[in-house]
């Protein structure tokens, strides 16, 4: 069974980094999902794709996969782009963009 180890991206709707300081190990689906003929919902017979394990560090996740004999791939961590912003810039003289509510 193949698993994927990655660090989740931060929530795009918030400026904080909450719930993104851990690593996730999840199973990779072996089979395609199929549409249910009656309701049209997508489903899969593989219930292991629903399991996501959280680890504090990447090394812990890799050690877990090695102990269980799982083939794993590690997605590189996305770089964090910090934009320095100041509240007073919203009201500065000579601002190039329009101020809106």
Image: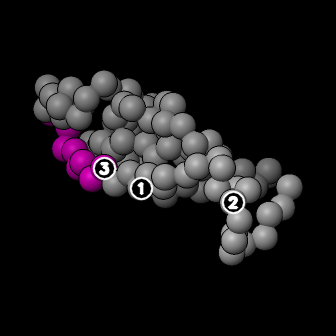
Q: CA distance from mark 1 to mark 3?
A: 12 Å
Vertical comparison of 32 with 22: above or below: below
**Quick one: which residue is furthest to the bottom in this view?**
96
- Which quadrant is home to the C terminus? bottom right
Q: Is residue 13 above or below residue 64?
A: below
- Residue underneath mark 3: 77
**Magenta extent:** 69-77
Tell me if 43 is positioned left or right of 24 in this view: right
| Residue 24 picture quarter | top left
- The crowd level at tag 3 (other Cα within 10 Å; few <14, some 14-19, many 20+) is few
Earlier residue among tags 2 and 3:
3
* Disc 1: which residue: 81
Q: Position of residue 60 (x, y in %)?
A: 21, 26
**Residue positioned 33% across, 44% down in the render:** 6
Q: CA distance from mark 1 to mark 2?
A: 24 Å
Question: Looking at the image, can residue 31 be seen?
Answer: no
Give the residue at x 19% y 44%: 71
Q: Position of residue 65 (x, y in %)?
A: 20, 32
Alpha carbon distance from label 2 to label 3: 36 Å
**Residue found at x 37% / y 31%:** 22
Question: Alpha-carbon neighbours of circle 2 within 10 Å: few (<14), some, or many (≥20)?
Answer: few
CB-based contact (under 8 Å), mark 2 and mark 3: no
* Residue under numbered circle 2: 92
Q: Secondary structure at mark 2?
A: loop
The answer to whether any part of residue 77 appears in the image is yes
């Amino acid at each position: 069974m193949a698993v994927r180890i990655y660090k989740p991206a931060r929530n795009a709707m918030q400026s904080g980094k909450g719930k993104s300081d851990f690593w996730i190990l999840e199973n990779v689906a072996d089979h395609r999902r199929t549409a249910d003929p009656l309701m049209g919902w997508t489903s899969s017979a593989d219930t292991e794709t629903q399991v996501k394990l959280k680890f504090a560090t990447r090394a812990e996740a890799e050690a877990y996969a090695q102990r269980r004999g799982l083939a794993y791939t590690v997605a590189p961590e996305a770089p964090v782009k910090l934009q320095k912003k100041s509240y007073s810039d919203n009201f500065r003289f000579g601002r190039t963009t329009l101020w809106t509510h």
